[in-house]
Image (cartoon, grey):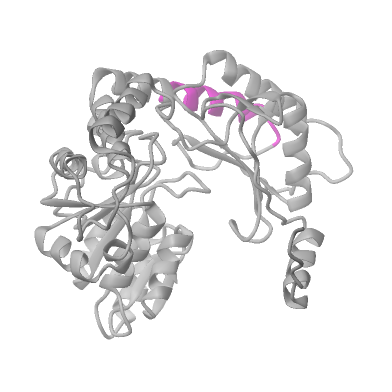
Amino acid sequence: MKPVFNTPNWMLAALRERREQNLMRRTITLDSPQTPQTRINAQAYTAFCSNDYLGLANHPDIIQALRFGAEQYGVGAGASHLVCGHLTPHQKLEDALADWLGYERVILFSTGYMANLGVISALAGKNRPVVQDKLNHASLIDGAMLAQAPLRRYLHGNLASAEKLLAKSAVTGLLVSDGVFSMDGDVAPLLGLSELANKHDWMFLVDDAHGLGCFGDDGKGCLSLGGLNADNVPILVGTFGKAFGTAGAFVATSNDVADYLTQFARPYVYTTAMSPAMAMATLASLSIIQSTEGQERRDRLARHIDYFRQRVQSLPVELMPSNTAIQPIVIGDSKMALQMSEELKSLGIWCTAIRPPTVPVGSARLRITLSAAHSDADLVLLCDSLEQVLQAPRSHAPCSNAKL
């Protein structure tokens, strides 16, 4: 007999409000690997909402490396990095990432969310403020909140707004930006932000979760794209759950900052280390990203992006300034976004509707993401389906300023 739980009224009210506003979130279960051709509830779909940008999540070489790592080093790390959970694969991965990106040190975290919480909560504080882009990822905002730091947010991508906040601050602190913004797909003005941080003597942190592996020299992401390096961006956060196709995260920085984080980044100190088998798999993924195959995948992804943007120019939406794998269609109304997502599903396209509070109120969207694993035929199917759905008559049309 199952236990009976008396749900508090405030909780029921919050859930009821979410349902009434068409904002209720639910988990879906895939019956297949993370590939474009997926199965959900026993139905076949072509998925366009995964962050597996290079199509490595089901790569045979990475699967083999995961198996080898488990056989040699086990599945679980057993302890935090600072107790006895730092195994040879962890050290090899840290060294390889530092060499690839040109930083003195890299330290691993279990997830990207934990990396941002750990770094910002350690570097910021009541007397060390944080200035962030208005559209930064939730983990970056939460890191500042965890630090109880004064938090100010500048207008999205606006250097003048950022400098105004830096200049007004009586003390220096931490300037923070995403590299690629996860819901809009645009790239931050990192060069300008770096110059502002240097001018005002602020530390500068970039989270390049959605850029690393996808573009730039050798797949080095937004920093390479903007001609930046460790001198311009002293703290770089990256994740493995996107283009790498595995799981976990890292922070690349100087020896001194890495030593400081090792002492004071609580999500690092008090968490069991990532699986050593996963570290081995990520090493294999990094090798692919740096190889000819990795460049071929980046080239294929770039062609998909170009094709998609060319096809949608004739549709009743305005293109957003995104040349990355993230190509959102902003619908506006949450109910309408859900309806259009369902219409795409009926045509064999799985693309989840993203609604507030993940995105600002009035900007619900279809967050379309492209992958090197998609075929040319997949892109044709997507664009044909979008034409059918976006041009279909409906009782409530998408908002007049809808953007793609």
Q: Is residue 41 left or right of residue 367?
A: right
Farthest residue, direction front? 1
Residue 298 coordinates in the image, percent (x, y)? 36, 25
Q: How many marks?
A: 0
Q: Front-most of 167 and 54?
A: 54
Q: Front-most of 21 and 389?
A: 21
What is the quadrant of the N terminus in the image? bottom right
Q: Residue at x 71, y 25 (%)?
A: 43
What is the quadrant of the C terminus in the image? top right
Tell me if I can see residue 219 in this picture. no
By secondary structure, the bulk of the magenta-drawn segment is best described as helix
Residue 74 coordinates in the image, percent (x, y)? 29, 38
Numbered range of the magenta stretch: 302-316
Does the magenta segment cover residue 303? yes
Farthest residue, direction right? 395
29 up-or-down from 189: above or below: above
The part of the image, by quadrant, that contains residue 301 is top left
Does the magenta segment cover residue 214? no
Q: Is residue 241 left or right of residue 169?
A: right
Tell me if I can see residue 98 in this picture. yes
154 up-or-down from 394: above or below: below
Q: Residue at x 41, y 76 (%)?
A: 151
Residue 300 coordinates in the image, percent (x, y)? 41, 20
Q: Residue at x 68, y 49 (%)?
A: 26
The part of the image, by quadrant, that contains residue 13 is bottom right
Q: Is residue 166 left or right of residue 325?
A: left
120 up-or-down from 301: above or below: below
115 up-or-down from 306: above or below: below
